[in-house]
Amino acid sequence: MTQDFEGAAAPQSGPRQGQQTPIPTTPPEERAVLVGVQLPGSEWRVEDSLDELEQLAATAGVRAVGRGVQRLEAPNPRTFVGRGKLEEIADLLPSLALFDDELSPGQERHLEDRLNCKVVDRTGLILDIFARRAHTHEGRLQVELAQLEYRLPRLTRMWTHLSRQGVGGVGLRGPGETQLEVDRRKARDRIAHIKGEIEQVRRRRHLLREQRRQGGYPVVALVGYTNAGKSTLLNKLAGASVLTEDKLFATLDPTTRQVRLPGGTVALWTDTVGFIQKLPTGLVAAFRATLEEIVEADVLVHVVDVTHENAQEQARIVEETLGSLGVADKPVVVALNKVDLLAPEDVPALPDLDGDVPEDYVLISAERGWGLEELRRRVESIVAGDLVELSVTVPYSESSLVDLFHHRGQVRREEYTERGTRIEGRIPLRYRRLFEAYGGAIG
Ligand SMILES: Nc1nc2c(ncn2[C@@H]2O[C@H](COP(=O)(O)OP(=O)(O)OP(=O)(O)O)[C@@H](O)[C@H]2O)c(=O)[nH]1
Ligand SMILES: [Mg+2]
């Protein structure tokens, strides 16, 4: 087991965020030590992951004053890191210890006792950022749900602290326990209530999407690692004014704008919340109403900050997250962004980057507007898709399907029969199954 440690006296040379970490105008109050472990088989170097954690911390207004890094076979079940490392961290007298991995409630409690400071894990920090950034009703609901679910198992803390300090005992145990039960019940009630409200949000979004579908507009979702440039791209394409920032998780709420494709089709492009490594599944689930924009999109544009030293790993995280949303097989165009930052001689070398660059990629600079025409062309060719010949009779109750045929396909013949609208024509392959019940392919 090797150990290394960088304390306040030897600060980590800033992460590559030299260009990214904003300089705080007021001195932040929190003095945080960042703690990470390198476990066997993990794809990320712990230092890179801590660079990212430092960037997250800066976004939350916290200054990192040191790092504790340890190579371990497995995290310590009680204290996550080993005893020696704990002492080194405690010596720095931080007001906050930020752990790069999710801690169990028990670990958090032990660590707070040993380090005598606040202990927050990566999830808690991300939730804090989300909470600051949620502006819409929907965003707030989703964040509150994620926070409550995160905190519920941690609600025992107050009580155990008291009992260990000897304040408890028989007299206090009753009320303490009762209070805890009350708190838990309140939290559970609130969770149920929010889930109900989020369900309404989902329904509303679903309706909106149905309306769009009836309008026949193809839907494009911008996905990608946080800070990749999704919002910048949407702004450039649509003249939208989505907040873009050199901070993680600038966007929480999806924005949708119309963008005309080169052939004249109008598509709806939606900007979504960024992904990040070690994003707990509970958090992803809380954002389901928003992420359904991705699930229901016709095409995904995966924006990658190709200048980031972990671009490959970031892209993989995005693919994994898409997989967990069940959309791994949706058509994707990869937009390798920020090429304006690359030296010209690096640009043509990109396709060989680790031999792992996907086929359907476009080099772009969202900021300069480079490559956007090509991007729109790629998207259009996917949206147009392969056309198949269909002959169907659609019941009058399903008039939206007739609209869809008109908007997305080419109607050659249409007549009104007793059973419904009879249509012959061509439609993109992927819509065929919608018409399966009403007829079939010609030839
Ligand atoms: N040089 C350069 N910078 C870019 C480009 N595109 C985006 N950026 C910068 O990258 C940072 C992040 O951009 P955003 O558009 O906010 O990124 P995002 O993917 O929406 O990020 P989140 O909403 O946080 O997930 C901003 O500082 C942008 O100005 C580009 O093509 N070139
Ligand atoms: Mg954004």
Image (tube, helix red, strand yellow):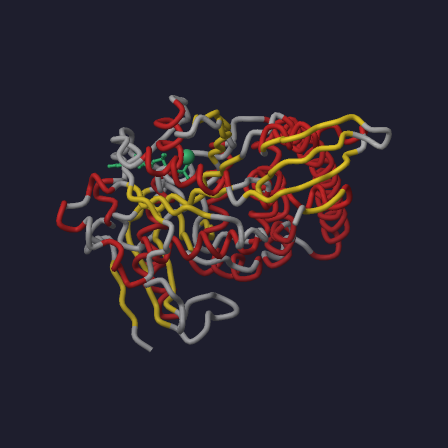
Horizontal and vertical percent position of residue 349 = 20, 55
Horizontal and vertical percent position of residue 292 = 60, 41
Q: Quadrant of ligand 2?
A: top left
Compared across the picture, whether 219 is left or right of 183 comes to left
Task: Report the number of discs.
Answer: 0
The residue lying toward the viewer, choosing from 137 and 440, is 440
Q: Would you place residue 251 above or below residue 74 in this image?
A: above
Q: Quadrant of the N terminus?
A: bottom left
Outermost residue toward the right? Answer: 418
Residue 81 placement: quadrant = bottom left
Q: Is residue 143 visible?
A: no
The residue lying toward the viewer, choosing from 292 and 383, is 383
Query: Residue at point 81% right, 30% down?
Result: 420
Horizontal and vertical percent position of residue 127 = 51, 42
Compared across the picture, whether 441 is left or right of 249 comes to right
Query: Residue at point 76% right, 47% down?
Result: 178
Horizontal and vertical percent position of residue 266 = 49, 26
Compared across the picture, whether 15 is left or right of 129 comes to left
Query: Residue at point 52% right, 27% down?
Result: 135
Q: Is residue 386 visible?
A: yes
Q: Would you place residue 165 above or below residue 208 in this image?
A: below
Compared across the picture, whether 121 is left or right of 207 comes to left
The residue lying toward the viewer, choosing from 375 and 141, is 375
